Image: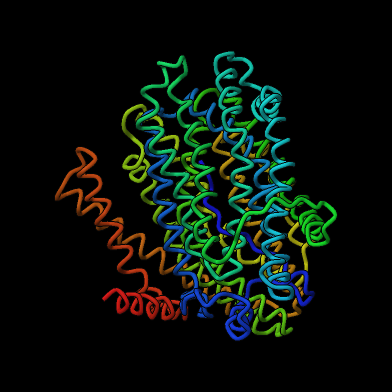
């Protein structure tokens, strides 16, 4: 169940080794010819809302396919012993992926690659890309072997209670071994993603996780029925699909990289200054992400205590919550990074604060209504997407209960993705690390406080509370760092957005009830029509309500939609 993550924010400052992707860099590249003229006009600077469109569109494709993948998982395998086993087995390479691939590596590789690209030219940049890929092949190849032969220890570390069920433990170990190469594939994909982003290509990297989702969907539908012929449980097909999909996520980006001039060469020089610089830049991110992984490990251990199902219910709900984050939060954060980096480089703190504040309000305009929708229609959404085949009505109720708690954190999740790269743009990698560690420690304490009254559901609520705490700490630290306080108008804007979202939710629910009166829910089709009517109502009234609430970002979103409509016409 891969998280479709676009290139993570990279440390940036006026120091040449921390240059970030910025519109000014792309403009200079056209003038000097340091980047091929194959880049389109659409890659030139634009507003945050406009720049987010390309990433948002690609991410939406990937996220929708991700939901379809989860639907296949629910249809064929439900929520229980085997899906719990798969989720833990898949979690093992993902723990290391966040540390050494799409998290720390992306944050260190992109600025170093751009520095070489601008100062020494393409050949030096391509050489660095090959150096990093070859070093990853050596290091992560070894890690793959460690995961393969040490699978039992890793499974016990994440879910010790599985050992009480020998069959569950054994199949988890088996799938862990099958997915052990996944880490290497997604690390290489992260390097390819960074290369393409450096050349202003965002759509292909953002859509590449779709290959993973398609491979998983096909494996679940067509491969699972034949697994028993080989003496394997059908769920093993999902492990095969994940590994093949991880490789495809990397390979799908190579044709575009090839068009920009990339050619693979075997070169391995561990003493290379640029490679060593990447290692130094990775260290703070690894420390911060390590705290997050400890948190995930604790969550898995606690959820595993409640038997078969909770790990899967938490996972299904979390994937639904990730859909709006991936479409809105990541897109706004990706688009914000360029503007923030430019203002930080010119030391224009007032414009930086204004950009961050506007981006946060834009994220609120998108995530507040999504939160209301997920909370109000949580049971209907889970039932429509998952309840079929092996996924029972009881699974729907449990997943919906968890989704309600996760949904509360939608804005906080998205806001953190905006604030963290702002610190990187200011050359501060320590504050996000300290905040992350403090938040994780707080969440572990909150876990134990909430798990007694709420059982495994307390883990989801603890995640939401910790997300808001993380956001609050980062916002406070940024205000101190920039010496620009958060104004009262910022709070009133959020209150107006929340009020508009609440009205939207009430209107949508009224439409849903009216649709039910006309077409009672008797099956999937009638539920889809009733829920679709409510969603269309919500989508249709949100922007007008935001305008009535005098939220300036609503006008920007309306202008963007009109431009897209004219372009489509």
560 up-or-down from 99: above or below: below
- Taking the image as shown, residue 322 lies to the left or right of residue 298, namely left
- The quadrant where residue 504 appears: bottom left
Question: Residue 455: where, in percent of width, then height?
Answer: 57, 32
* Vertical comparison of 189 with 27: above or below: above
Q: Give x and y (percent) for residue 422.
A: 68, 70
Q: Residue at x 68, y 69 (%)?
A: 114
* Residue 1: x %, y % from top left: 51, 41
Image point (71%, 62%), residue name: 473
Given the current orientation, which residue lies at the most extreme left position?
518
Q: What colour scheme has been applied to the protein in the rendered image?
A: rainbow
Comparing 348 with 42, the one in front is 42
Q: Farthest residue toward the right? A: 271
Q: Is residue 49 left or right of residue 565?
A: right
Closer-to-camera residue (350/171)? 171
Residue found at x 65% / y 63%: 9
Q: Nearer the viewer, residue 400 or 76?
A: 76
Q: Is residue 364 left or right of residue 128?
A: left
Q: State the count of labels.
A: 0
Whether residue 77 is visible to the viewer of this picture, yes or no, is yes
**Residue 437 showing in the rendered view:** no
* 45 and 265: which is toward the camera: 265
Residue drawn at (83%, 61%) of the image: 273
Q: Which of the 4 quarters of the picture holds residue 508?
A: bottom left
Give the quarter of the figure containing the C terminus: bottom left
x and y, in percent, of residue 437 in the image: 76, 51
User: On screen, 495 above or below 59?
Assistant: below
């Amino acid at each position: 169940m891969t998280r479709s993550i676009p290139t993570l924010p990279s440390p940036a400052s006026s120091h040449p080794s921390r240059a970030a992707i910025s519109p000014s860099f792309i403009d200079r590249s056209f003038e000097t010819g340091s980047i091929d003229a194959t880049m389109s006009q659409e890659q030139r600077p634009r507003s945050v809302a406009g720049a987010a469109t390309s990433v948002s569109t690609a991410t939406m494709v990937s996220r929708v396919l991700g939901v379809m993948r989860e639907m296949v998982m629910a249809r064929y395998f439900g929520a229980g012993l085997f899906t719990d086993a798969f989720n833990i087995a898949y979690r093992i390479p993902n723990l290391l992926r966040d540390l050494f691939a799409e998290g720390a590596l992306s944050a260190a590789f992109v600025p170093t690659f751009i520095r070489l690209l601008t100062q020494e030219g393409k050949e030096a940049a391509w050489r660095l890309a090959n150096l990093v890929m070859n070093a990853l092949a050596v290091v992560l190849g070894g890690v793959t072997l460690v995961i393969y032969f040490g699978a039992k220890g890793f499974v016990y570390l994440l879910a010790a209670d599985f050992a009480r069920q020998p069959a569950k433990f054994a199949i988890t170990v088996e799938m862990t071994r099958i997915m052990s190469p996944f880490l290497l594939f997604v690390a290489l994909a992260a390097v390819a993603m960074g290369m393409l982003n450096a050349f202003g290509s965002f759509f292909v990297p953002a859509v590449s996780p779709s290959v993973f989702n398609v491979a998983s969907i096909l494996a679940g539908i067509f491969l699972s029925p034949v697994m028993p012929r080989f003496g394997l449980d059908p769920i093993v097909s999902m492990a095969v699909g994940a590994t093949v999909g991880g490789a495809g996520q990397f390979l799908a980006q190579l044709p575009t990289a090839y068009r920009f001039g990339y050619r693979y060469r075997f070169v391995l020089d561990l003493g290379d200054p640029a490679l060593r610089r990447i290692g130094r830049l990775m260290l703070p991110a690894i420390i911060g992400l390590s705290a997050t992984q400890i948190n995930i490990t604790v969550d898995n251990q606690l959820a595993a205590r409640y038997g078969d199902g909770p790990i899967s219910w938490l996972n299904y709900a979390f994937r639904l919550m990730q859909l709006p984050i991936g479409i809105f939060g990541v897109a706004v954060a990706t688009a914000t990074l360029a503007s923030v980096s430019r203002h930080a480089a010119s030391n224009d703190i007032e414009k930086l604060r204004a950009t961050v504040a506007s981006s946060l309000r834009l994220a609120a305009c998108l995530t507040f209504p999504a939160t209301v929708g997920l909370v109000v229609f949580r049971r209907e959404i889970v039932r429509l997407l998952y309840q079929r085949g092996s996924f029972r009505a009881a699974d729907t109720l449990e997943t919906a209960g968890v989704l309600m708690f996760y949904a509360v954190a939608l804005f906080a999740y998205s806001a953190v993705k905006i604030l963290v790269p702002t610190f990187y743009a200011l050359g501060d990698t320590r504050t996000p690390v300290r905040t992350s560690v403090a938040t994780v420690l707080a969440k572990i304490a909150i876990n134990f406080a909430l798990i007694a009254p709420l059982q495994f559901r307390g883990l989801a609520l603890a995640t939401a509370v910790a997300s808001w705490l993380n956001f609050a700490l980062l916002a406070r630290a940024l205000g101190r760092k920039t010496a620009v306080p958060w104004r009262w108008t910022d709070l009133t804007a959020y209150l107006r957005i929340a009020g508009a979202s609440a009205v939207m939710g009430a209107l949508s629910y009224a439409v849903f009830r009216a649709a039910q009166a006309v077409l009672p829910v008797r099956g999937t089709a009638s539920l889809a029509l009733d829920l679709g009517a409510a969603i269309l109502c919500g989508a249709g009234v949100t922007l007008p309500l935001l305008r009535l609430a005098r939220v300036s970002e609503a006008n920007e979103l309306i202008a963007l939609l009109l431009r897209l409509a004219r372009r489509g016409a």
